[in-house]
Image (cartoon, rainbow, N blue to C red):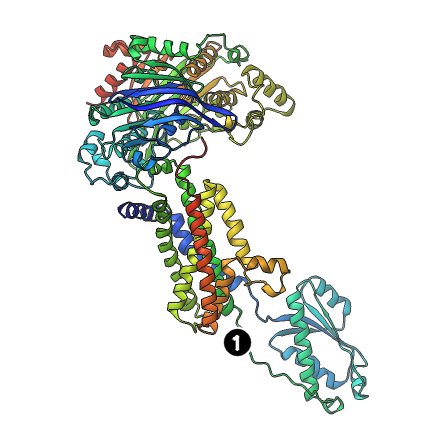
Amino acid sequence: MDTVTIKNLTKKFKEITAIDDLSLKIEKGKVTGLIGSDGSGKTTLIRLIIGLLLPDHGEISVLGLNPETQKDDLNKRIGYMPQKFGLYEDLTVIENLRLYADLKNVPYDFERLLEFTDLKKFQSRLTGALSGGMKQKLGLACVLLGSPEFLLLDEPSVGVDPISRRDLMQMVRDLISPETTVLWSTAYLDEAHSFDTAIVMNQGKVIYHGKPYDLAKTTEEFENKVIDLMGGYRKTSSQIAENYVPKNSDIEYTVVADNLEKVYGDFYAVKNNSFEIKKGEIFGLLGPNGAGKSTSFKMMCGLLKPTGGTARIMGIDITEDPEKARSNLGYMAQKFSLYESLTVKQNLDFFAEIYGIHNIDLKERVDEIIDIFGFSQIKNQKSRDLPLGFKQKLSLACALIHNPPILFLDEPTSGVDAITRREFWNHITSLAQKGVTVLVTTHFMDEAEYCNRISLFYKGETVAIGTPSALKERIHAKNMEEAFMKLILESKK
Amino acid sequence: MKILRALVKKEILQIIRDPSSIIIAFVLPLISILIYMYGINLDFVTVNIGVKNDDNSPDITQLVNSFDHSKYINSEVSDNMSDLTQKLIRSKIKGIVIIPNDFSTNLEQRQSADLMVIADGAEVNTATHLQNYVLQISNQWLATSRYAQQVSPQIVNPQIRTWYNQDSNGYYFILPGSIAITMTLIGILLTALVVAREWERGTMESILSSNVTRMHIVLGKYIPYFILGMFSMIFNLVLCIGVFQVPFHGSYLVLILVSALFLFTSMGIGLLISTILKNQFFASQVSIGIGFLPALLLSGLVFPISSMPEILQYITRILPPRYFITFIESEFMAGTVPSIAIKSSIFLLILGIILFVAVYKNTDMRLTHD
């Protein structure tokens, strides 16, 4: 018996074909992973399955119901967690749970859920004040109310650290019955590899459907196979790095954090954070959500005033002359922070101007960047309409427009597919080879391997610092993910 | 019923947590009443004028003095015409009265005597007031002067008595009217964001895949904001009647009932905007444009409807504030006039129901975009 049967499904948005003549069966009682590049149609497919969108052609049957005409009956039997979790941020944890319990007409029986999610202590906290990992657990708890027969999770683990991701997976496995079907869309291929079934989507079509283990035995191999399926990634030399003009300087340690500290009331967001980064080094800042990585980042680039200690960028003290220190920085923020209503070219013009590039050079520089980054086709498109991968590339272009000797990248690859991530890291490593110093945060542990050195951050403090291999050796871990978990757990003791 | 109760409870919690809706409901009326009370003045005002007297008869000196004795006029006597002109240009004085040198001679010879009044037309209201004041004062003077028998007595002598607002206090009439404007704004602003917010924050997607029906969603928005809106309405009335002592001659019950109907319509406008636009920024822009400006300009509070171009007069007929202003002004100043109260109620009820149906029809139970 299949939970979902889809025949020749097509869905178009204006000119764009989101789902293209797709046929699919999802087996009952299995956890199925939905993988694919940005804009491959994963979210659209999930929304079609539960009747939030209507198909243009084709048939869908879910739990024996037609989502087009029997949506109300279907709603009673499913649990759907949208990408933004669907929680009310201005309600407390318990208020959200009670609301969803009432909407699903089930009694207020949250003991087991609260225990599993570890949210008992935070019951009366506003949801907006929870960390990403906790929100995600609460979102899942709300969805699990009423024991749905079919659970649909749309990228629940974007921007969430490895520990929270592992907890979430455990929660789902523990809380569902063997008959429950789960459809789980994800960008993390290691996650997908652990599922019963994997569906790989590309351009609105299913390009692989089967056991992930049949495709590849290990996670790494699985990633390579999936990338091959999606058209493959050919490593080429990075045009961006080749056209980078390094600035001459004899400073050895270009980025220095000197006992950085940030206190809110009596809460230490960051405590005694010290590190030195050499010219041309890629330095990774890893840690669970809420560990203080972004706070450190903002202090390092002078956006937030430290309550103690300081940072030096190219030898310039950030607390004394933040403007001058910042002029040496290219900063890529966690969220897409370009102007969505401006075109690609207008965004570049704007950032060139605010970085102080003058009239004659400006046009030349912007044209050059458009050329190097391959934006000529899309330069007059509004950045809102770009696929996520292109948005990330545009953000990087804006950060690099003034040829800075230092790059700060705050979770540059969150929500980006595997191919785009590889491209992105190709540019980063090539830039570092040309002498650019890179400070980067990430939740992808495989990306941590690209770093020369890593600082592991937990509860505002540095737990460990060293090369990826040294850290793995120290704790006897076979990969970075294991090292991360072990080191964090060790520091908890 | 349980679902509806849960949605209403959720919305009330959000109202309590979010200071902006409290500010809209209670601070906005306070500010707006203060502005209408002190900022907009339609009353008789004191005007500064200059007087140039070219007639040196002692009787005329009396006339000149009586300009100064009026409580509506501050006069300044000068022989220097260019000086007065300069003052008029600089807006130090609003007008000049010139008494020509043959003024008393003409009166003596029972001929018509001219008096020149120059008024600053840049401020039309003040200029009109000024002309009336000068006319009144000179007539009074004439009646008591020794020239009185020289002029034929006036046959018609109107005795003016103002009803309903005996003191011609502008704010007695503008404050109740202002409640209509404020409540339009509050009804629309409170609700214009609340549906759009759910779409933007992604919570609508969760709600739509639970057991709620369309009616749950619509009532889940109407009920909590109606309660908040009524509190705001009562607060307005307390300010108006209790604090600013505007006399109230009507029935509180009728006032509250018609106000509730009015709130129902303006909430309908806000919810319709929000439901259709699904975007908080657009919704707030549009609600100011649709809600506030027509209410202020076309409702008859500031500009009389009868002096508007015909096409605008037709437009005012579909504006809820127009009916509510007529009702609330008469309720305050004349007491309950059944024909006005019933006509306003029927209109507001019909419009409110039309809007409710429109909101219901436009409430999407599925996503329409990607």
**Residue A182 horizontal side relative to residue B171, left or right:** left
What kind of element bears circle 1? loop
**Residue A275 showing in the rendered view:** no
Q: Residues within 10 Å of mark 1 (few under 14, many from 20)?
A: few
Which residue is nearer to you in this view: A64 or B242? A64
Q: Whole-percent x and y of residue B329?
A: 49, 68
Point 32% across, 9% down: residue: A215
Which quadrant is home to the N terminus of chain A? top left
The residue nearer to you, when weighing B260 against A57, is A57
Q: Is residue A400 above or below residue B178?
A: above
Residue A357 shown left or right of residue A108 in the figure: right
Q: Is residue B32 visible?
A: yes
Which quadrant is the C terminus of chain A positioned in? Answer: top left
Give the percent coordinates (x, y) of residue A253: 42, 15
Residue B52 appears at what percent x and percent y? 74, 74
Please indicate whether residue A114 sits to the left or right of residue B192 in the image. Answer: left
Residue B264 to residue B172: above or below: above
Kindly identify which chain the residue marked by label 1 belongs to.
B
Residue A227: x %, y % from top left: 40, 11
Residue in the foreground of this view, choosing between A461 and A395: A395
Please name the amino acid that badge 1 sits on.
Answer: Asp
Q: How many marks?
A: 1
Depth order, front residue of A253/A211: A211
Residue on which the image places disc 1: B167
Residue sticking out furthest to the bottom:
B149
Residue ID at (21%, 33%): A114
Up the image or down, B101 lies above or below A427; here it is: below
Left or right: B54, with A148 as reference point: right
Kindly identify the residue that appears in the image at 69 percent across and 88 percent down.
B155
Q: Quadrant of residue A43?
A: top left
